[in-house]
Image: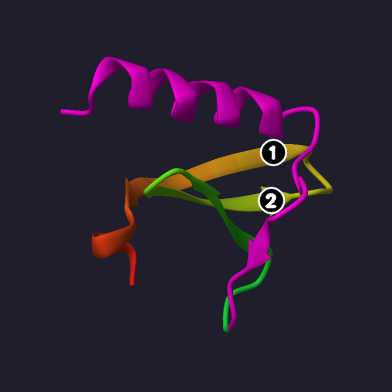
Amino acid sequence: NLPKQQRERLITAIRLLTDTPRPSGVKKLKGYDDTYRIRIGDYRIIYKIQDQEMFIIILSSIHRKDAY
């Protein structure tokens, strides 16, 4: 369970991805097609962009110590 403040930050970041799927600071993951990660504090949101279908698929939101 995430603390409420952290959960709200992650939800806000995910919502912003709908308008800007590749925001400043985004990193493309090596070895994966169209898969990216953004940093939100100590957490990482890992997601895939399907431009043709205009979809963003959230694959994971995890603490950085568990992300790598």
Q: For the N terminus, which image quadrant?
A: top left
Mark 2 belongs to which amino acid?
Answer: Ile
In the picture of the structure, the residue carrying the numbered disc 2 is 49
At horizontal 33% and vertical 72% (from top left) the residue drawn is: 68
At horizontal 25% and vertical 62% (from top left) the residue drawn is: 65
Q: Of 36 and 48, which appears nearest the observer? A: 36
Q: Of 38 and 49, which appears nearest the observer? A: 38
Q: Of 18 and 50, which appears nearest the observer? A: 18
Scheme of colours in the image = rainbow
Relative height, residue 27 to residue 20 (above, below): below
Find numbered disc 2 in the image and state the secondary structure of the residue it sits on: strand
Relative height, residue 65 to residue 61 (above, below): below
Relative height, residue 65 to residue 48 (above, below): below
Q: Residues within 10 Å of mark 2 (few under 14, many from 20)?
A: some
Residue reaching furthest to the bottom: 31
What percent of the width, then of the height, locates residue 55? 69, 38
**Number of the label disc, if any, that sits on residue 55:** 1
Q: Are marks 2 and 1 in contact (CB under 8 Å)?
A: yes
Cα distance in 3D space between marks 2 and 1:
6 Å
